Image (cartoon, rainbow, N blue to C red):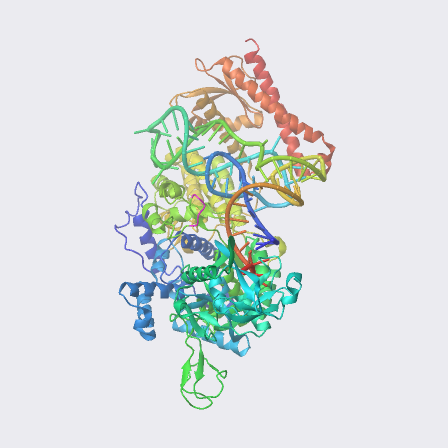
Amino acid sequence: MPISEPTESAPAPDQLSAQYDPATTEPAIYERWQQAGCFTADAARSSRVGGDREPYTLVMPPPNVTAILHVGHGLNNTVQDVLARWARMRGRETLWLPGTDHAGIATQNVVEKQLAKEGLTRQDLGREKFVERTAAFVEETGGVILQQLASIGASADWSRTAYTFSPELSVAVREAFVRLYERGLIYKGHRVIHWCPRCLTSLSDEEAEPQETTGALYHLAYPIEGDASRSLVVATTRPETMLGDVAVAVNPNDERYQGLIGKHVILPILDIPIPIIADDYADPEFGTGVVKITPAHDANDFEVGRRHQLPMPVVIDEHGRLGEIADAAGRVPPELNGVDRFEARDRIVEMLRDAGRLVKKEVHQHNVRHCYRCDTVVEPRLSDQWFVRMTTLAEPALAGVRTGRIRLLPEKWNGVYEHWMSNIRDWNISRQLWWGHRVPVWYCAACESPNDVIVSREDPTECPRCGGPVVQDEDVLDTWFSSWLWPMSTLGWPNDRDTDLRAFYPTDVLVTAPEILFFWVARMIMAGYAFMGDAPFHSVYLHGTARDTQGRKMSKSLGNGIDPMDVVQLYGADALRYTLVAGMGLGADVILDPADLEKSFATGRNFATKLWNIGRFLLNNVGTDPVRAFDELKPEDLGRADSWILDRLDVAIRECDRSIGPLNPTDGAWRDEELGSGLRLNEYAETARRFVWNELADWYLEAIKTRLLTPGPDQQVARAVLVHVFDGALRLLHPIVPFVTEALWQKLPGHVDGTFLATTSWPVASASTTTSAASGEFELIQNIVEAMRRVRSEYGVPPGKSIDAFVVAVASYRQVLDQERALLARLARTALTFVDAAPSGAAANVILPGGTELIVPLEGLIDVKKECARLQTDLAGLEKQLASLEARLANPGFVERAPSHVVDAERAKGDEWRARRELLRARIGSLCGQA
RNA sequence: GGGCGAAUAGCUCAGUUGGUAGAGCGCCUGCCUUACACGCAGGAUGUCGGGGGUUCGAGUCCCUCUUCGCCCACCA
């Protein structure tokens, strides 16, 4: 997947430009990864087919082929890329399989809009021409999004790029249909479905999205036959459907209407009698307790109609206009014929009002379903559609999650999944579209029974029974009928012998948004069990949504979106990625300000720049020639700072490992205690950032500057440790910020040409978790430096001025501090003099952990009264803390019941605080006593 | 109508077996200290939504209220 050409050549080999420029660096690096085949998975190496590596597989949720990258895609694919790169470094044979979705309705709508501009409709072109044109459009403009993904660093295996409408995947779709049909799980149903009058197709339940709407509830009076003085009042939100009414229903237990059941009312306007029936569906509490029954235009009414064997006249056509369609003889008066349903509503209400039939109209809140693609109000409509029977498919999918074979993260989705799966309804898979997989069903005009359909893997040329011509079903399949096969079909299914399928199925983690949990995830799980006999993945990572500062979902129509390409252009892909990963708790939404990209992405940009500058520092001070091998260093060679940073690196690695968690469950299924483990990418990012910035850059680099400038063996040690630690940091960070880390890694001393950070190994923490004494000593130095800086800042000592301090140190520390005088002088700009007791006089006083006391005489700078006040405040604070600590320690319940390590820690803290209290009191006595 | 989630520093959010709170951005002060001003050093800020309970001890567990958000549902 080539991305845009680098605009300038990369900087000279041995130096880094003063300013990091992602716009030139990133495309060049991506190109090299591509050329080196870093992202191409080798099925033969999968241990499942006898290779030497465990596989790790992610399938990319295929974006719509016509889609343009938005932040949601950025978020989704960044998470996947972090996982893919991490797994790759962990030595897995990693396959991240990309692709696109032909997106039936969505794509067809786009092309129809284009046609509309030319004054044409798809019918003007005809089916064949229209499909050709759409295919050409997809060919031409499709897949832009994949290139955009490449430019944010996606390490997908582009050699395996899939497409739901490709010939291979079309075979899979047909195979799935035929197998389900053969198993009796696909049937043609005649029932009320959701119909979009704009897209002119049926929709699945999931595709018809309910929206809270303020409508009206109309009370209409239907006179009772034979007793014109009395009438039944029905309540309806959709009076225009009354032309299709075939009955009114009351609850059999509703005493108000007992005597009327079996009689008839006269349907107004049409003046025809319709029966009064009893059915539980009528809720006595709602409205008047009388409901009009329109079987062709309401799913519930349809059920009632079926129970009572009522006729089902269709009075609204496919465009949502009143008209006589089926069984509707004489139902639509000429003056209403062809009138749009909403206008018809007003007209009919008007007619009923004139006839005195409108009792009242009240405001009513209710849910109205809208088409998820074009937002048109969906029309329930009676028609013939293909359905998949879901109950049997749902069983193993439900069990898979219950047993831990699959886990959903965050775990709160388990309940939602469970509920949906347990109450699953049959899936309407036929769409009256032209763009999509044609239903593999043929009809023979000659054969007697229209129910004897031909369902076939191959296109039949003639009727197998009579040899006559056959006609294929006009409908296409729901796009999701191809998507639900994605983890299998992209790997070669239905060819069970396909190497990819054997090497990489089942996959590992599915990363997606919760919005498509039912559309896609649940169905993939069902398909996995139905066709492969196993779950398609072991983890589902459901991430949050990108929202603006008002919490609104970013969308094109609201104009509150952020174009990730703008961010890449301005700040680089790494900045985008880091910001997204660091800002996103597990399953939490990411809030970004579309009006201020700088503010939103400064975090990531600044971090990439920081890394770059650490790299520059290293290169300037160490050069590119190989340094002493880190493994050859002996513990006694190491300085205190060296030991400390190595300990910190170990800790960072361990914490990162814990945050990302295990690659997969230990034995097939997740055990309860590990169900929620890992995939805390924000924690991982924060740990790595803290290590590299607050520890490596802020302390280690500063601590070794002198050593790096002083030739000799110790310089070699410092160089070797610096290179080792920075190398470790780059490895830790690579999955999140791949470009800048790769650029820097390539420049590390001793880098072997042709090797890539992207395919090198993930760092391993040393086996021992105990920290060295030297490392603890460095922390003492840090404490002193921080204390001195605080003193300097507080008393306004000019930065250039060095100050002298007395140290009252316990013997064991004196040697350490004595040896590190130069370091202390540089970092704290303080010269130390050792004394055994605090000298009296005006001075700032700092008590450090471990019993070291610093006294800073500040002739002419110190305000004795101010210092005394400060010491008093410190003492008061300490007393308060100590009091609560001692109260806790005095509490038998705490000592007996708290874990011993907690109690021990509290005791140690108490001892230290008491010692500090004594020092403080003494100091206050000597300094403030005389005042 | 059911179910679920969230409420923590000015803003966006971390806080995984209960042990007296953290980050980024913003803010204040001082610094262009030869890697970095996209930076460095220092600093301020929280009755962890209200109330009740369990516990020696609760941001963390239970109940309840308030406010937001999401999902599901055949009440016309």
The extreme bottom residue here reads A466
Image position, residue A106 (x, y; %): 39, 63
Q: Nearer the viewer, residue A869 or B70?
A: B70
Q: Which of A568 and A389 is in front in this view?
A: A389
Image position, residue A569 (x, y; %): 32, 48
Image position, residue A393 (x, y; %): 57, 69
Residue at 42% x, 20% y is A796
Q: Give the range drawn in magenta.
A: A549-553
Residue at 44% x, 77% y is A440
Q: In which quarter of the image is the N terminus of chain A?
A: bottom left
- Main secondary structure of the magenta stretch: loop
Depicted A931 relative to depicted A874: above or below: above
Q: Quadrant of the C terminus of chain A?
A: top right
Write down the quadrant of residue A133 in the picture.
bottom left
Q: Is residue A550 magenta?
A: yes
- Residue A789 in view: yes
Q: Does the magenta stretch include residue A397?
A: no
- Residue A96 in view: no
Q: Nearer the viewer, residue A61 or A112?
A: A112
Depicted A362 relative to depicted A281: above or below: above
Q: Nearer the viewer, residue A127 or A154?
A: A127
